Amino acid sequence: MTKPLEGIKIIDFTHVQAGPACTQLLAWFGADVIKVERPGSGDVTRNQLRDIPDADALYFTMLNSNKKSLTLDTKKAEGKEVLEKLIRESDVLVENFGPGALDRMGFSWERLNELNPKMIVASVKGFSDGHHYDDLKVYENVAQCAGGAASTTGFWDGPPTISAAALGDSNTGMHLAIGILTALLGRDKTGKGQKVAVSMQDSVLNLCRVKLRDQQRLERVGYLEEYPQYPHGEFSDVVPRGGNAGGGGQPGWVLKCKDWETDPNAYIYFTIQGHAWEPICKALGKPEWIDDPAYKTAEARQPHIFEIFKTIEAWLADKTKFEAVDILRKFDIPCAPVLTMKELANDPSLRASGTIVEVPHKKRGSYLTVGSPIKFSDMKPHVTASPLLGEHTDEVLAGLGYSQQDIFNLREIKAV
Ligand code: COA
């Protein structure tokens, strides 16, 4: 099966999560991704949170599958020379170094464009170019705070809260992948490469779009009717943290199921979608609510929405989260069990679809990872193990025309 990105050569100058998540995705879809790493150490995540001594950590293996690894000291003249050769024959260079690192290395956008005018140069930074914080180094949680996610996540009586989803890292990598593919299509038309830049702050904010919607609604009318603060609590002049409230026109909440006292994940998410009110009343055995004016419309329900949720919890008290969803799905009610990582790892549907995959690895034995969440009718991305440090150095250098003796010499001076 040929893959759509076959023939696209990518210099993967990325580390940690944001950049590697982007290049991993492109590798799944067929790109030849060569990860350039510092000799001796490589990507810092190879060593972070190791669970097996002397084997690459899962943090690395789960973000660098389907890639090659080339060790190269790009601060040494000989290393720069190798990189220049690689640049001349590559389609894309992706990097997520701290601000200015690539320039200090001698590979500014102008220099890269001069070496290969057709190459796309894609960067992740914490903040966009010209932003008053553009000199800052940024990690995941910093981005979640800077992008508006933290101030709007959590409960109103608690502090700003970080989401477990990598909104700053992997989400930014996905934005960058879209940018790279767009620039590749653009190059087909113009013959020219371009610079693609994505900031973590912007990518978080893009996913917090509805919170900016809420800020403007709040400023206009002084309240937000779908938030738990309405109508009994108080609003200030900024979007509050709304706990587990639904973010659109459908109120929802995380509700307790059987055994919640002992199982911290015995919950479902329950959504009261307007047109599902009648089936909800039927499912709950409350047919009298269907035409009761105090319950009939979303507006009428909102002032006592938590009393309604309590009634639903009473109904859920003798049902597990799975039993509850099995009943509610028959009534077309949008809901789901709160699933743990253990349940997801063992979910047969996710295994069958290739979303959870088991990958054999030379040193670790096999490990689980998340495969492509994007499914195609003509291609099933196959996840292969992440490379060992420098596993493909000889292969890549030979492809650039270096002889065995040249490679030996480069090793002697620790340039590779
Ligand atoms: N050979 C020689 N030097 C190399 C090299 C190689 N193969 N690869 C990297 N380096 C050097 C760089 O040139 C740079 O050196 P310099 O600072 O002397 O110019 C250094 O290694 C890397 O610096 P930096 O990227 O700033 O690493 P850091 O560990 O201090 O910071 C981050 C890590 C993630 C905070 C920072 O890279 C960053 O802010 N990145 C942009 C935002 C981002 O992607 N964050 C999310 C990560 S999930």
Image (cartoon, rainbow, N blue to C red):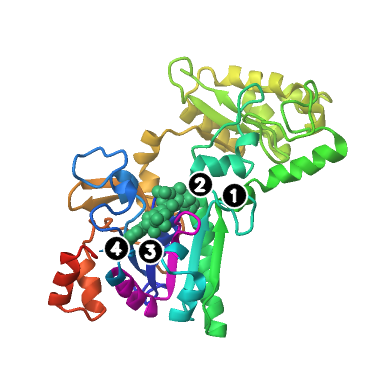
User: Which comes before the other along the chain, label 3 or label 4?
Assistant: 3
Name the residue that disc number 3 marks.
12
Give ligand 1's quarter of the image: bottom left
In percent of width and height, residue 391 lies at: 21, 62
Q: Earlier in the sequence, mark 1 or mark 4?
A: 4
Amino acid type for the residue under numbered disc 3: Asp
Q: Are marks 2 and 1 in contact (CB under 8 Å)?
A: yes
Q: Residue 138 carries which label?
A: 2
Q: Which residue is drawn at 47% across and 54% down?
A: 98
Residue 1: quadrant of the picture: bottom left
Q: Which of pointers 3 and 2 lies earlier in the amino acid sequence?
A: 3
| Circle count | 4
Disc 1 marks which residue?
A: 201
What residue lies at 14% left-to-right and 70% top-to-bottom? Answer: 408
Q: State yes or no: discs 3 and 4 in contact (Cβ < 8 Å).
A: no
Name the residue at 50% across, 62% down.
Answer: 123
